[in-house]
Image (spheres, rainbow, N blue to C red):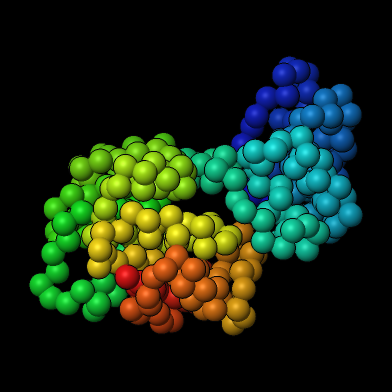
Amino acid sequence: MTGGPLFVSSGDATVDGYYKSALECAACGDFVRAAEILRGAVARVPGFATAWFALGAICDNLGDRTGAIAAWQKARDADPADYHGARLQLARIGAGEAAPAMTAAYVRRLFDQHAESFDERLVSKLDYRAPAVLLDAVKGVAGQPLRIGSMLDLGCGTGLGGAAFRPYVDWLVGVDVSPAMIAQARAKGLYDRLEVLELQQFLAPEAESRAQYHLVIAADVFGYVSDLAPVVAAAADVLAPNGLLAFTTETHGGDGVVLQQTLRYAHGAAHVRAAIARAGLAIRDLRQVSTRHENGVPVAGLVAVAS
C-alpha cells in the first residue's frame, strides 16, 4: 500500500467504521478483503475521498492498475484540494498530468504529519545537508567575511536552514505552509519573524510592500514545486539590489520536470536556468550536488545561486 491516508470522516459513522475496518484488514495483509470493504463504503458515500484514495492505494498494491486509476480519479474529483495527493499518484503511475502542481493542502498535511520527527529523520537517517551546501555556495559567491542584513528562508520547515545562516544574519524571516513545522522552528528561537503561508501567498504582499531581502534561500523546498518559474520570479521581486537567491533542488538527466517515484520533483538544469533567466536574474553558481541520501544512495541534485 502506497502510504496510509490519514482519517477524514465521511460524515456517516457506519461508513467511517467500514473505512477503519478496511485499514485493519490491509494492516494484516488482507488487501482483497480491504478493497471489498472500501467499495462498500464508497457505494454508500460516493464523495468519501479518503476511502477512494485508500482503495486506489490497495489496488496499486495488488497490481490492479485499472482499479487504482479509477479509484484515484474518484478521489481527485471528490476533493479538489487533493489533500491526500491522488493527482500525484495518478502521475506516478503514468495516468494523468505528468507533473501536476502539489496543492497547499497536500503539502501542509505531509509536513504537519512528520514535523515532530523531521530533524532526526533528515539528519540522522538521510544525511541531509542542504543548509550546509547552501551556506558554502553563498559564501563562495558573496565572499568572506559573510554578513547578511536580512534573509528570507522559503519553506523554512523546522529551522535547519535558519540555524546554519543565523550567525551571519541580522534579520531572519521564515515562511512555511505547515503550522506544525513553524511551531518547531519557533521553539528554536532563531527567527525574528515566522509566517504560516504558502510561498506565493507570502511573497506577493511582500513585494507590494517593497520588502527587500539581501538573501533568499530555499533548502530542498523546490522538490515540492513543479514549475520553478513563478516562485523564482516572486522571490526575485523581494530581493534587494545585488541580493542573492540560493536554492537546492533534485535533478535528473533531462531538461524538464519529472515527478519521481518518491513523489518529489526533479528539475533538469535547463529548467533551472530558464526559471532564473525569466526572473531577470543572473546565475552566479550552478552545479551538481547531493543534499540527501535515499536508501543509502546519494540523491542527484543542483545548487544554484543567482543575483
Report x, y in % for residue 234. 43, 55
| Residue at image location 81% in from the left, 59% down from the top | 95
Left or right placement of residue 51 versus residue 232 in this view: right
The answer to whether 159 appears left or right of 113 in the picture is left
Q: Position of residue 40 (x, y in %)?
A: 88, 30
Residue under the point 89% across and 29% down:
43
Given residues 306 and 167, the one toward you in this image is 306
Q: Is residue 286 above or below residue 120?
A: below
Seen in the picture, residue 286 relative to 195 is either above or below; the reply is below
Front residue of 163 and 277? 277
Q: Can residue 110 be seen in this snapshot?
A: no
Looking at the image, how many numbered discs can be counted on the residues?
0
Residue at (81, 40) in percent of width and height: 74
Q: What is the quadrant of residue 89 in the picture?
A: bottom right
Where, quadrant-wise, is the C terminus in this rendering? Answer: bottom left
Using the rendered view, name the quadrant where residue 232 is placed.
Answer: bottom left
Q: Position of residue 84 (x, y in %)?
A: 65, 42
Image height of 77 relative to 129, above or below: above
Q: Is 21 displayed left or right of 150 in the figure?
A: right
Do we see residue 219 in this rendering? Answer: yes
| 209 on left or right of 70 | left
Seen at 81% across and 46% down, the residue is: 73
Where does the image place residue 302, in percent across and percent down from the top left? 44, 75
